[in-house]
Image (tube, grey):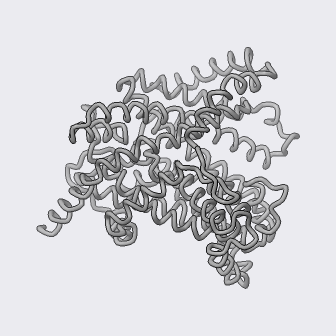
Amino acid sequence: MKIKTLYTTLIIITSYFYTFFLNSSSIDENVNEILSPISNKVASFVFYSVSMGEYSFPLILGWLIIASLFCTFYFGFINIRGFGIALKFLTSKREEKKAPGEVSHRQALWTATAATVGLGNIAGVAIAVSLGGPGATFWMILAGFLGMSLKFCECTLGVKYRIINSDGSVSGGPMYYLSRGLKEIGLARLGKFLAIMFSICCIGGALGGGNMFQANQSYQQFLGITGGDESFFYDNAWLYGLILAILLGTVIIGGIKSIAKVTEKLVPLMAAIYILCALIIIFINFEFIGEAFNLIFIGAFTGEGIAGGLIGVLIQGFKRAAFSNEAGLGSAPIAHSAVRTNYPITEGYVALLEPFIDTVVICTMTALVIIITGMHLNTEGYGGIELTSKAFAKDIAWFPYVLAISAILFAFSTMISWSYYGLKSWTYLFGKSKNKENVFKIIFCFFVIIGSSLNLGSVIDLSDSMIFLMALFNIIGVYLLISKVKEELIDYKRIKSSE
């Protein structure tokens, strides 16, 4: 599909959409009214919670944490033992000879990281600290470390059961190791059912949380740095969405190779900018670093001054980590499956770096800035990203502009990767062909415009539910196939020891 054709199609669809729908002030309300009953029912199932003191504990969070713990102990703390090996694979310039795949280890990692490093690293962490206090940071870091082991396992499976298509492209991810892997152990019907359900949820999650929500929030940040209600784009959100859709289409039209080339440069750059700004704030407040870490460790085990005490602090920290790095959701294995390698376990090693980058480094930086500037004591009246922005502005007035630009870049990178996740789920359900792929790409880009223009709360709520419903199907497969990962690890060690 030519880029010019994509642009023309988007402009035509947008003009019709704007003419017939955006002029109607009630479209938001109508869509929300229709979807609210469905969204509420699905969300009540996916995020079913049990009371723990003054806090509610979502069972889906327990599902993710238990799986992370299980993988950590099953593989003998591979998250720690394998860290150096992972760095070696990531930094090595040598590539395996005649290895199938489309992208390098580094490109696969940054593509998957692009999806996880998003607005949650800025806004979500602020919410966790404001609700759980500084101690939530400790549990967030711990959950990030545990998530590394789960990511190692699911991404190894993604490469092991991927399909190399006749044109050399790769199709992989949970839908393939659920269907092919479970068939291998005599559970074909269960595997097919889980794969189909995962794919449906992944498409819904890609269009909502991985697209519309990101477009909407990036638009709000864009308004913030271009004049707010005095900005030209204030009444022209659709135009912002169209420009964003065109930029996105330029990247995704070329498939995973094009996506990987962009994310390989964009993600390290935007992460470096954000971390550098955070380090500057921390350095300015250097004398408070000791106190900040003291608050983190003491608060982690006492929960002093926080509603719900220790349990409340633990829940907020674990929730932020699990919801941020996506370990167990099954999204990352789709990107990692495209790697060029003959040994699935090598990508498992590389993948364990993802939660470390997302949660242990970037999320922790956000938390430290909020704590070290004292903004955790002044949270009333501020939303997530506003609280982080106030923390960044405390010492350097223009830093919120850098934060806003980072937020826009984070959102854009998330959309890039989720477009690929949605596409692979789409082709699993409907078959692989250029026309079918192009249909999804046009739909995805069009949803960027909708997300920028409308406030569809129920759509986003339903999408979030579908994203975490992915974890329910994915982790069943991980448990049933974890012995296959162990076999891959043993075989790889044997091969390397004999060389």
The answer to whether one can see residue 270 in this image is no
Q: Is residue 13 above or below residue 293?
A: above
Q: Residue at x 51, y 63 (%)?
A: 143
In the displayed orientation, state which residue is furthest to the right.
230
Q: Decide if residue 86 is on the left or right side of residue 231.
A: left
The answer to whether one can see residue 190 in this image is yes
Residue 269 image point, x, y percent:
56, 58
Number of disc labels: 0
Image quadrant holding the C terminus, namely: bottom left
In the displayed orientation, state which residue is furthest to the left.
498
Q: Residue at x 31, y 41 (%)?
A: 177
Q: Is residue 350 above or below residue 48?
A: below
Q: Residue at x 34, y 61 (%)?
A: 349
Residue 341 image point, x, y percent:
26, 52
Q: Is residue 420 above or below residue 79?
A: above
Residue 425 image point, x, y percent:
42, 33
Towards the viewer: 382 or 281 = 382
Towards the viewer: 182 or 403 = 182
Q: Decide if residue 497 is on the left or right side of residue 474.
A: left
